[in-house]
Image (spheres, rainbow, N blue to C red):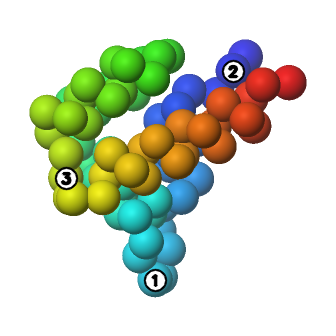
Amino acid sequence: MRQSFYQFLLTHRGKLEQDDYSQLADWAFYDHHFPKYAETYDEISEYLEWNSPFPGALAAFDALWSEYEWKHSS
């Protein structure tokens, strides 16, 4: 079974030195409305466009989505 993007994102939580990836992961963990079971880029991207938690969130999401797709392409 394919790991959801949310599950992948959570692997970036809890860093002692916060970066945009860990900041997005921590935010998504506490945001009860984050689309945890979304399977498409557009669904998550649209949510973040309306609810962006910090200025670099969309750029961090784009980079993480690329990593997620690469990791799960096999």
Where disc 3 sits, the SS reads loop
First-in-chain label (2 vs 3): 2
First-in-chain label (3 vs 1): 1
Q: Nearer the viewer, mark 2 or mark 3?
A: 3
Residue hosting label 3: 53
Q: Which quarter of the figure is the C terminus placed in?
A: top right
Pointer 3 with pointer 1, Cβ within 8 A: no
Residue hosting label 1: 17
Where disc 1 sits, the SS reads loop
Amino acid carrying mark 2 in the image:
Arg
* Image spot of residue 40 (x, y percent): 47, 17
* Image spot of residue 56 (x, y percent): 30, 58
Mark 2 neighbour class, 10 Å CA radius: few under 14, some 14 to 19, many 20 or more:
few
Q: Is residue 2 visible?
A: yes
Q: Is residue 9 left or right of residue 18?
A: right
Residue 28: image quadrant is: top left
Distance, label 3 to label 1, CA atoms, is: 18 Å
